Image (tube, rainbow, N blue to C red):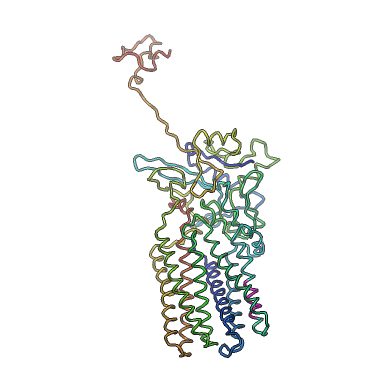
Amino acid sequence: MNPAWSVILLTTLVGAAQGLFLMLYGAELAGYAGSGGTGPGFFALGGVIAFVLGVAALGASFFHLGRPERAWRAAAMWRTSWLSREVIVLPAFLAGTFFWAVGHWTGAAWTQPLGAATVIAALALYLCTAMIYASIRFIQEWASAWTIVNYTLIGLASGATLAAALAGARAPALVPAFAALALGLTVLATATRAVALVRNARLAPRSTLQTAIGIRHPQIRQRAMGFMGGSFNTREFFHGRGPGTLRWVRWVMLAAGFAFPAALLALVLAAEGRAVTNQWLLALALMVQGGGLLAERWYFFAQARHPQNLYYQAVS
Amino acid sequence: MTQLALVIDLNVCVGCHACVTSCKQWNTSGAAGPLVDDNPYGADPSGTFFNRVQTFEVGEFPNTQTVHFPKSCLHCEDPPCVPVCPTGASYKRASDGIVLVDYDKCIGCKYCAWACPYGARELDEERKVMSKCTLCVDRIESTTLPVAERRPACVMACPTNARLFGDVHDPASEVSVAIRERAGYALMPEWNTRPANHYLPRRRTEGKVHAEDLQRTDNPLKVDGQQPAALPHGPGREDFAT
């Protein structure tokens, strides 16, 4: 597939927003809200950041639409379409996060039950976003439970890193817990993403030129795709770059998205107590991981081989 | 239940692209607005087409066959593009099985194109909605066209009659008989999309020449009274016909 920046930003940012909210809500349940260590307004600030990230993701998604003014129609087919389900769950998650932040700002008593409902929305949103891709059965790189596992774990890991960086700046008491969670989730996500990489490297395409045109002969070559200019079919389904670029992006994603932030988080945990250093280390970990996970999402799309490309192999 | 479809005879398609141009001509002139032609005379032209003819070479030289392969929407009986549509703009008509896009509901998210293994859908870069073959629904339902012309434009245009049109659920229809008797097949059966459009395979045509047929005893020259010399092997297979 040809990766679209709108969708890369949408899935990466909203995944981190969900992760951040889940970390903050976990800290609230653990009793950190209002205690001396967090400082006033930490949860409200975190909730607002999760909300803003989610709104930015929603805004990015509009750039993927040909007719954004009709986007409201996309909630209609929730019975059959995972995209429609995402369109319903995403605003629900954003609304829950927003009012949870408002509740913390005003000191309301209902933040815990509202947060519980928002947790359900956040987890459902991971499922909806991943199933948009995992449900397309003939894009074999995507059609796997690992897509769901990776979307969830990568979102949680980046959200935890964001929560740790935020705690480094505003609530040092929460740094050890958040940094440990971020490290654990990043290591776990590395493992599951690696499994998906190995799985995809071993895939044998079920569709071949033989099944595509229905001629059972071992030697078939396309001589003409029927036109010499471009078309939607030649633009949308292939990234247009060589295998070298893909290898390069894969190393960037493994290093920047997973290995380097994990090392930084381990460093922070080892140097516990040095608040000033840790604050900058966590900010660095967040920025590196953010860039690396954008590369991860680019690779996720670029690696997917759409069977329609079988029909567009030779210009003439 | 009716399921309208095309049956494409690869044995007689000569790859002339008349179906491509007639499709473009009819569908760019319809009520839904023109199919974009971006930069048509420039270095990198692009545009929306519902139908393409591709060419494949099968075998290794010198034992090759050139197969011209027209490809348009296959109007699957279980279309994967329909359930993924978030707005309901993509739908399959219950009355005749045509897969259509409601251009007024489409938001141009391209998800249906991702969900089509055949690449049958194209986003129109000018109208910003997904577009696809309609089986010329505005021709076949027309009340003003002569009855004989209420068929898809590509079928009307084909000079070798390689495109048959009809109801594949009616066992007595021309298309059903062709599929049944000439081993009509569907594309990418591995995904269980059950395409309604079928393709008829190439057929081996052999001419067998027997040595004794090359010289005939009842040569027409006898009309002139100039009988040729008797053949060394006697009468051949096709002698005695007159």
Q: Is residue A135 left or right of residue B205?
A: right
Identify the residue at the far top of this view: B225
In the current view of this chain or complex, which residue is farthest to the right? B143
Residue B111 in which image quadrant: bottom right
Q: Is residue B72 above or below residue A180?
A: above
- On the picture, is B169 further left or further right than B237? right
Is residue B221 in sight in this rendering? yes
Foreground residue, A228 or A149?
Answer: A149
Vertical placement of residue A187 versus A164, above or below: above
Describe residue B134's horizontal placement relative to residue A186 as left or right. Answer: right
Main secondary structure type of the part rendered in magenta: helix
Query: Quarter-wise, where is residue A49 in the image?
Result: bottom right
Residue A243 in percent (x, y) is at: 39, 62
Question: Residue B65 versus residue A20: which sits nearer the camera?
Answer: A20
Image coordinates for residue B110, horizontal then vertical, percent: 57, 59
User: For residue A193: magenta?
Assistant: no
- Residue at 65% x, 84% y is A105
- Residue A238: image x %, image y %? 47, 59
As drawn, which residue projects farthest toward the front?
A: A30
Q: Nearer the viewer, residue A200 or A229?
A: A200
- Depth order, front residue of A159/B102: A159
Residue in the image at 36% along x and 25% along y: B209
Vertical position of residue A23 compared to residue B234: above or below: below
Q: How many marks?
A: 0
Residue A188 location (% of width, % of height): 45, 72
User: Is residue A66 visible from the viewing direction of this image?
Assistant: no
Q: Which residues are magenta?
A: A93-101
